[in-house]
Image (spheres, rainbow, N blue to C red):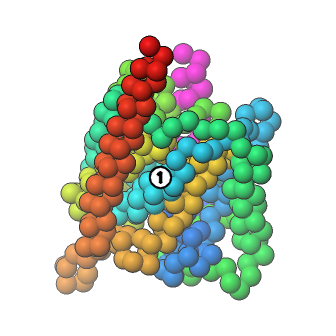
Amino acid sequence: MRGKQKMIGAGLVIGIIAALLVVFGNPKNMGFCIACFIRDTAGAVGLHQAAVVQYIRPEIIGLVLGAFVIAAVKKEFLPRGGSSPMTRFVLGFFVMVTALVFLGCPFRMILRIAGGDLNAVVGIVGFAVGIFGGVQFLKRGYSLKRTYSVPVIDGAWLPAIQVVFFALLCAAPAYILFSESGPGSMRAPVWISLAAGLIVGALAQRTRLCMVGGIRDVLLFKDWTLLAGFAAILAAALVSNVVLNAVFSGYFKVGFMGQPVAHIDGLWNFLSMSAVGLGSVLLGGCPMRQLILAGEGNSDSAVTVAGFFVGAAFAHNFGLASAATAVAEDGAITGGPTLAGKSVTILALAVMLMIAWLNTRETVAADAKQKQAVS
């Protein structure tokens, strides 16, 4: 019970922080979004040329460094790796691309629901279906094999890179790109964003907060502890948005149309988030959890984060990311997923299922061989 109370308390704080970041300047329904903010950072350092989504997001820096500092203080910084790193890179790549087909990570999906976006409700159904599929492989023995202790420097690379990113953000040299319009131009002040990231990173590290893990644990063990944290984020962000809407307007609107940075194609909202859910189960955690684990010294999660960055770059360089739905003056509806994005979503599901099947078969075979050797 004490653990669940701490989880709920952390969720309430995180939900309020996410809502306040919008007040301070972040895009609506996007106080926090791992996928969107990694995409923005990738654009800022020139990995893609989509001018409207280029900005080194301090929230991502704070998440990693917050987890790193707390892990170090609590003696939980344990450098480890070697658990199928290239497979994790590929899974990270496809999780990021399909998240950008949906236009948000699981964290933003919750914040979109808290803002009244019903498209995200369709997304969360697909997300749960994808997790359910992943759990079936877990029950049959799926594994990417064990991790091993690695040198401290291997576990410290991603936190160190975040320090470099922050220095580049503050120095703002000419080769670092900043959006002048679009979502990338909407940002809270640097120090507020960094502080928010540090707090959320520290809370997520201490509570092991993970939405994928929450739904997985409910399905496998009937344990609602982790999921209670995201329920608390939803509740806190929802109440905050309703209050803000009553005072300022524009923070809460129930419906499918007119939602900020969202599209109304239900089928691809469902399928893209199914891929995000399945891929995250195979990775062992949602995108935010991967950043926290990387901050704790897990080099496999750092490789996964590298996959996220490359996936974000590919999504915008090759027209895989969706466009927000818009209504023209003549009433024509534009935006939504691209043909390329739809194709890659199907490819992602196929690759993830292949990875799940192969790693389940190999694990079962290895276990059988070990039992035979013992007998």
In the rendered image, the quadrant that contains the N terminus is top right
User: Within the magenta stretch, is there residue 134?
Assistant: no
Would you place residue 84 above or below residue 227 in this image?
Answer: below
Would you place residue 135 above or below residue 104 in this image?
Answer: above
Q: Position of residue 132 (x, y in %)?
A: 30, 36
Q: Nearer the viewer, residue 154 or 130?
A: 154
Q: Quadrant of residue 224?
A: top left
Residue 162 visible in rendering: yes
Q: Nearer the viewer, residue 248 or 343?
A: 343
Q: Which residue is mark 1?
A: 87
Magenta-colored span? 1-18
Residue shown at 48% from the left, 80% from the top: 50
Please, what secondary structure does the residue beneath circle 1 have? helix
Q: Quadrant of residue 80?
A: top right
Q: Nearer the viewer, residue 208 or 344?
A: 344
Would you place residue 277 above or below residue 312 in this image?
Answer: above
Q: Main secondary structure of the magenta part?
A: helix
Three-letter amino acid code of the residue under disc 1: Thr
Q: Position of residue 157 (x, y in %)?
A: 72, 56
Residue shown at 63% from the left, 44% from the top: 81
As drawn, is 230 to the left or to the right of 320?
Answer: right
Q: Residue furthest top?
A: 375
Q: Position of residue 20 (x, y in %)?
A: 58, 52
In the rendered image, the quadrant that contains the C terminus is top left
As drawn, is 297 to the left or to the right of 310?
Answer: right
Residue shown at 48% from the left, 41% from the top: 144
Graded by Cα atoms within 10 Å as few (under 14), some (14 to 19) or many (20 or more), the crowding at tag 1 reads: some
Q: Position of residue 60 (x, y in %)?
A: 62, 57
User: Within the magenta stretch, is there residue 6?
Assistant: yes
**How many callouts does the rendering have?**
1
